[in-house]
Amino acid sequence: MRIDIVTIFPEFFDVLDISLLGKARANGLIELGVHNLRDFTHDRHNTVDDTPAGGGAGMVMKPEPWGEALDSILDSGTSGSDADPIIIFPSPAGVRFDQKMARELADEQHIVFGCGRYEGIDQRVFDEYAERGRVRLVSLGDYVLNGGEVAVMAMIEAVGRLIPGVVGNPESLVEESHEDGLLEYPSYTKPAVWREREVPPVLRSGDHGAIARWRHEQQVERTRRVRPDLLPPELQHDA
Ligand code: 6GU
């Protein structure tokens, strides 16, 4: 997969050199391009923002640098011939990012992330590229971040680990929160007793059927308690 990021804070993404995703890049599973939006300005101060049309507080990102930056990525041929990229703008005004979207994005050949700052990006940028291809505004949740960089980092981590070969043991992807619509069951390891707290005996019973049933019950109970909105209808009887 090819990932391009447009941002005024390219250093933010230096951390993608490390950990699981760093290895995926070294292995060639993920190809990353980080582009400084200011490199696509032409004035002495590398201006990327201006006052909002119609007045109001804050600043809005100007369309021209975004146009030049995105054109250079879309025209550079890094996207491969078969698939046109999907362009994602992180925004609290977007549709909610979730595991289903992460799975869908993991199938993409090329994702372009446009990180807005200030009060947002001139609407015409979205309109322009939506006319030419797939554009999505995507939100992590109902709270406000100063800019899209942290959100893009989260999305890249969620998507990157679903690309085949990035996570060493694919089975570890199956039994985790959200993959089956429920929160994950609690995990334990050795020692069997720690500070007088015991590992549940069923997990030491060797009875794989009983263990699977116990884990499923724990998933349902935990989901009902902390995220009842996630419970599938057949499990929605009153506790
Ligand atoms: Cl994707 N961007 C910003 N700026 N704030 C957010 C967000 C995204 N998701 C939640 N809050």
Image (cartoon, grey):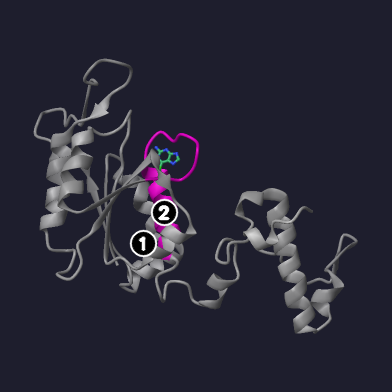
Instruction: Name the residue rendered at 15%, 55% in the picture.
Output: 74
Q: Is residue 143 above or below residue 214?
A: above
Q: Amino acid at mark 1?
A: Leu
Which span is picked out in magenta?
A: 138-160
Residue nearest the observer in this picture, 195 or 149: 149
Residue corresponding to mark 2? 155
Side of 50 relative to 72 (left or right): right
Q: How far from the left and from the top, in percent, is residue 138?
A: 38, 46
Identify the residue at image location x=62%, y=50%: 229
Q: Secondary structure at mark 2?
A: helix
| Depth order, front residue of 16/219 | 219
Foreground residue among 67 and 18:
67
| Residue 225 seen from this side | yes
Residue 85 counted in the magenta span? no
Residue bearing the label numbered 1 = 105
Q: Quadrant of residue 211?
A: bottom right
